[in-house]
Amino acid sequence: ISSLSAKKRGAQATPAAKPATQQPTPMQPPAPVIKAPQTPPMQQAIPQPQSYAQALNAIKTRMTADQVLINNSFNPQFINFIRSLNLSPTEIQALLQAGMNIHATWTDNNEMNRNILSSLRNSIQTVTQMQPVLQPQPIQPPRQVVQPPQPIQPPQPIQPPRQARQPQQPERKRPTQQNQPKKTQPFVQPPAFKPMEPIQNMGPAENRFITNNLIMLLDPRKKETVQAGAGSLVQRALIALYQQVSPIIMTSNIWEIIIRAKEIIGEQHLQKLRTIKNPQQLMDYAQQLSSQMPMLGSTGVYLIILLSRINFDSNHINCYFHNANNLVLVIPKRYIQTNMPNAINLSPIEQAKLCGFNSAVLNAATDMNPSHLLQQIQMQKSKPAPEGKFIPDLTSLFTIQKKNGELIHPEQTSKWLIYLSGHGGPAYVAPGRPREQLILIAQIAGISGSQFKQLMNFFDKKIDTAYLHYETCFAGGANQTFVNETLSVLDVDFLVSTQGIHEGETFSGIGAAYTQTSLEITGQNYIEFFKLLRLFFTQQEAFVAMKGKKQDPIIKIIKTLTSSPTPQNQPFIRFPSAGSFVATSQTEKVTVQKGKSQETFLQKTEVLTKTMVHAHEIEQKPINIKDPVNVLVVNTPRINVAVNLGRKGPHGHIAIVIPSPEKSLPGYESITYFKEINWQDTIQSLLFNCSYLNARQHPQTFVVNNLSGVLLPQSGLPAPLNSPNIRHFIMNIQPILGKNMTNAPLPLVVLNRYLSAEQVKVAKIGGNINVCFEFNDTIYQGIFAIGDTENVKDLAQNIEQLRFTATPKNSINMNALANNFLSSQEIARIAKPITLESIAQFINSKIDKQDPSMAIWSGAEIKDLRKFATDRANK
């Protein structure tokens, strides 16, 4: 699982990446060459242990940290030392865990620590499945991995790892992806990917494409560097290079990590990886190479195998360097040959022109040798590149297609289909700070809000953009509102899609699996993504015939880019005519690992639109939502018919999600009113399902006039005297914008009290929650607070412990209760005496002021519409 958050990655022992705003010194010496760690002779030999206990004691008391771990990766000599003891797999695992727990170097960054821990655990799993070595070798202290700055020179070759032995027993199932393990099978060389089918009936062989594919990976702030380590953007770049269906624009730091890794590993080892047939031996060999490549991080094994499958010579790849900024353009030759066979023999510069790029700012690489490419990158680094010039220089890569918003040569235009990715950050507005500053705070796909606006304006006004999909952390919530406002102000005419349901991180599962015939990339299928997009925009009938009648076309396209069907990754689509991002209904098949077995189930998102709700209201029919729906997105503030959410399904109950608004409005409050909900679960589970996917920057209030089906004893409520239903349920969520910048443990959930901003991590949004309802002529109240919504399982279990304070209806102080949900000015306007019913009705009436269209469907007009519908049906 890789995150697109802006959190720093890499081990603490490596130097930090330079800030993007720091100006490089002219003629700066080249960056250091990272070499494979050497192991000089030990100063003092450790006697060979004869038992597990002696080995454990040696790890605890006699070994230094660098004898066990090199930059938080196991020292190969330490692995040989453990495996030479002729111990059981359980004992080997325990000793490796002891070495990890005692000698790992932890940082103050939880995300980095999680990466370190995940990498070490993967290494332990790999080692425990390997055969023991015959001869022990002494453990020796390694030298530092990062050498002092020096001119670029050929790196010392990595010592060939020991050839993994053929397993003496049937091969085990090996998980190739965290949530989708596959059965190990004999590995053979992957066949060449079938290229995208060219569009038929193009007429004469003109020098143009019918659509221009493009992958953009932007990291101008250098979150991923040789020193800080590889992350999600390096993964995406390697996948794009492997699949060869699009040009790739990337910042030079991403390209540098790839080329540096290729140089250090060496062609000899990459060639050997290509020839290994057995999956276990392939993984073992890549694991040993990865242990000497700390800059590749926890996904090093996967990245090295991918790297071995990519041909970087000039017969397969064109590489271009921007002449003024740290940008690289890579165009696979297969992309050119597939789309324009007649152009394959042209010069690289001419080929770039045909792909829609401006040759005036490009310097084509004449030598694809890693050392030469690294020298070109160093030359780029030596030139000043102010942050304010990044977007102008980025957009200068394109050939202009429009003037004054109109196509210059409509008959020759090629539509752009763009995938954009980069690290993101939350657009949180501190108290007292105007919301207009969102444009300065938001971090979207690697660039600031103002830069994003510049880029979208260029896509709309200067080139013929048809579709943009962007992936970034914090793609929902306030960032999504900001993007929508930006696109609305610019009045763009292209489709935009993204993934992200609230003010939290999004994740994408990317991995590799080995089938009987090929290496299979899971989670980022750019081949299908661009194939479907081309059909969608150029051959609609063929697209409809392929997609089927029941599936939303854009959802089918977006699904090619994700294998993490978590609710947080809910896709949102913006059509120009609609002017807002909207969720769409979808169904996914999800496979999870439970112990030694796999479980597959359907997971569905249902969307209640205003039109759908009005149709039910006219006919006075309840809305029935049944399993396997696990997310219900409510796009209307009021539902005047019963909503039947029924019993909890095998994989949980239904989360109720209220999307962020289309625009940033001062003092905005989200209000959702339900006439009736049938909820056959506890009240506590309703509180959880109304909160964990609704982390927002604005207050939210839910009102349920009649709540039926609740499991009363499990909710801590007595047996009913008359009606078993709960009346006038009100839930209010007040956002908490986190300010805590420490790594101290912070509360996930607290019951019966509130949290302060200092008790919530910075870049997180929590919530202080008030709830009340009427039952058995008694008013029940409860308060709790959520500090973090990411740990869903623990969150649900903690909220389930909440119990309510019961007060007889006639003796409660209603002014104090009303103060939990309304302002003092609003309380003064409520008809007296104040009751829980009058509070609920007042909150309901606020909807009509926020959304005047809701008031149309009330009273006599509903009766007239119902009569009209009945008359039409009779006729």
Image (spheres, grey):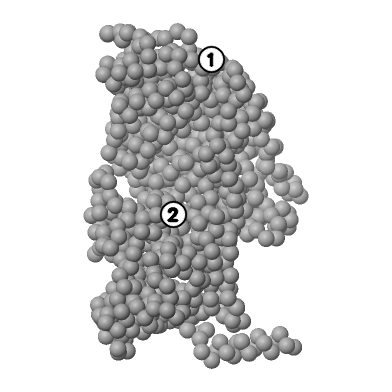
Which secondary structure, mark 2?
Answer: loop
Where the C terminus falls, by quadrant? bottom right
User: Does 78 sit above or below residue 123?
Assistant: above
Q: Does residue 49 appear in the picture of this structure?
A: yes
Residue at x-position 51% and y-position 20%: 130
Residue drawn at 61 percent across, 33 percent down: 183
Q: Is residue 468 above or below residue 55?
A: below
From the viewer's perspective, tell me whether residue 659 is left or right of residue 43. Answer: right
Q: Which sits earlier in the primary sequence, circle 1 or circle 2?
A: 1
Q: Amino acid at mark 1?
A: Gln
Disc 2 target residue: 475
User: Picture quarter containing residue 12?
Assistant: top left
Q: Residue at x 32, y 81 (%)?
A: 809
Percent position (x, y) of residue 470? 49, 51
**Image depth: mark 1 or mark 2 in front:** 1
Q: For this rendering, which residue is in front, 770 or 226?
A: 770
> Tags 1 and 2 in contact by the CB under 8 Å rule?
no
Residue 474: x and y, percent?
A: 41, 53
The residue carrying mark 1 is: 163
Residue 111's disc is none
Label 1 Cα neighbours within 10 Å, binned few <14 / some 14-19 / many ≥20: few
Which class describes the residues within 10 Å of circle 2: few (<14), some (14-19), or many (20+)?
many
